[in-house]
Amino acid sequence: MLPLCFLTVALLGGLRVSADNHAFIFIAPPLITLVLAVLLMVLFVRGHLIEFPRWLTNTNPPLTNVSHVWMLLTLFFASAQAFNSVLPERGLLHWLFSVFFLWTLWNNQFSSFDARRLLRSLVVLFGTAFILKHLLLASLYRPEGGWLKRVAGALLQGVSLGTLDTPTFAPATGYISFFTLTLYVTGLILLIFAPENETREKSHPLVQRYLELSPADRLTVRETILADQPESDRLEGSNLY
Amino acid sequence: MQQKFLQCTGLALTVIYGAFIVWVYATEPRTFKEVATSAEVAAGTYQIDQERFNNALALFRREQFRAARDEWQRADPAQGDARTQFYIAYSFYREGWGRVFYNQDLFKQGLESINRALTLVSNGQLSVDDPNLQMHSAAELKTELEQGTERNWGDINPLKVLRTRK
């Protein structure tokens, strides 16, 4: 279910609709979006949205490990395409948005995060970029806009010596981007509330650390705990295992 | 066991879906129709519109090259048929040919078409049996188009006006 959701994001993230003939334009993710996706994946690990020790471990069956690797891959490309969806395609604005994302993600690397706070932060980040690109800029550069909009667009172009030049797309592009981002955030929410993560969040930190251990280490821990207990408690405790 | 089967099926389906996405970005179709055409090409079931092809051939023989090209492009929207691409290249050659000079733009477009035709045949050799043509092989047409785009001292030879179009 989740890889399917993330793959759809990867498909639609680079899709634009031409304003002239309503033809599809597929824009492959630029290099900067891959860098941003790597930073975001690191944030996911720090925010415990992805837990490598539990997702990829020799205690899991091989098929489960393969599934987890595949999901990580799809999540990576979905992240890259989510950025691609809200980044202007070229010009100075492309680099301004890229720096804005880079700066935000880099700062977040040094903040303390849990999965829910991280998700809220991402919704704000993508939401802001979406509004700037698909509402504000698209409205300024739209050819059929009113004279005030066209004057503002021309002034902006003049002041920036043409470096703010950005291609115009059909309004459908905005709708596709909105759907893509919604799907991406839904995927992340599903990831947080996945049954595995749910039990993980509710359990005690000490139990969490215990679950991260290998079976041999778990046995050692159990034996040590039993060795510390009086004989009567040990007999009761052994029934638990 | 059932869970394992479901896991395998899900994984296989998403891998196929992932491959489809890579293919879409590689081929960059512009419409849903192009998606279908590209899928036919990939599956090996692609066929040109023979009726349009014949119409284009009739136009070509009447020396209406632009109309013929337009019709051939409609007959072969995926540009996946070597024979059609050969004829398109030939129409560029005939239209661009001049007694005094060649139209460089048309010759360059012809070269692109003939190169496309050559990439579509597995052994790199393409021959069209059409008695109305004077060049039957793609290699011959390609050489003619290449010579037309090159500049040399022979271009100022006044005897060049005596040459004939193939």
Image (cartoon, coloured by chain):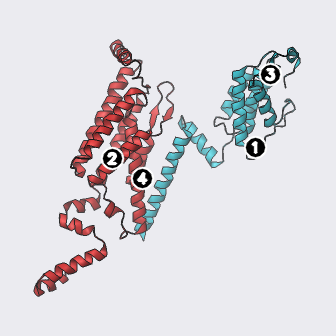
Chain colours: A red, B cyan
Image coordinates of residue B111 in percent, x first then y, are 72, 30
Q: Which residue is under mark 4? A: A73
Q: Which residue is under mark 3? A: B62
- Which amino acid lies under the numbered mark 1 shown in the image of this protein? Gly
- Which amino acid lies under the numbered mark 2 shown in the image of this protein? Leu
Please identify, in this view, whether the residue under mark 3 or under mark 4 is nearer the observer.
Answer: 4
Answer with left or right where residue B127 lies relative to residue A39: right
Indicate the quadrant containing the N terminus of chain B: top left, top right, bottom left or bottom right: bottom left
Please identify, in this view, whether the residue under mark 3 or under mark 2 is nearer the observer.
Answer: 2
Cα distance between the residues tagged 3 and 2: 63 Å
Which chain hosts label 3? B
Image coordinates of residue B44 in percent, x first then y, are 66, 48
Task: Determine which of the numbered discs, if any, sits on residue B124 in the image.
Answer: 1
Q: Which residue is under mark 2? A: A40
Asked where in the image residue A136 lies, by quadrant, the reply is top left
Please give the name of the residue rendered at 57% of the width and 37% of the height, measured from the top-left corner: B34
Please identify, in this view, whether the residue under mark 3 or under mark 1 is nearer the observer.
Answer: 1
> For the residue labelled by badge 4, is the local secondary structure a helix, a strand or a loop?
helix
Answer with left or right where residue A132 lies relative to residue A67: left
Which chain hosts label 2? A
Q: Mark 3 and mark 4, same subunit?
A: no
Asked where in the image residue A230 lies, by quadrant, the reply is bottom left
- Which amino acid lies under the numbered mark 4 shown in the image of this protein? Leu
Please give the name of the residue rendered at 68% of the width and 33% of the height, measured from the top-left corner: B75
Please give the name of the residue rendered at 78% of the width and 23% of the height, measured from the top-left corner: B94
How would you rate the neighbour count of disc 4 (Cα within 10 Å): few for under 14, some for 14-19, many for 20 or more? some
Please identify, in this view, whether the residue under mark 2 or under mark 4 is nearer the observer.
Answer: 2
Q: Earlier in the sequence, mark 2 or mark 4?
A: 2
Image coordinates of residue A57 in percent, x first then y, are 36, 66
> For the residue labelled by badge 2, is the local secondary structure a helix, a strand or a loop?
helix
How would you rate the neighbour count of disc 3 (Cα within 10 Å): few for under 14, some for 14-19, many for 20 or more? few
Q: Earlier in the sequence, mark 3 or mark 1?
A: 3
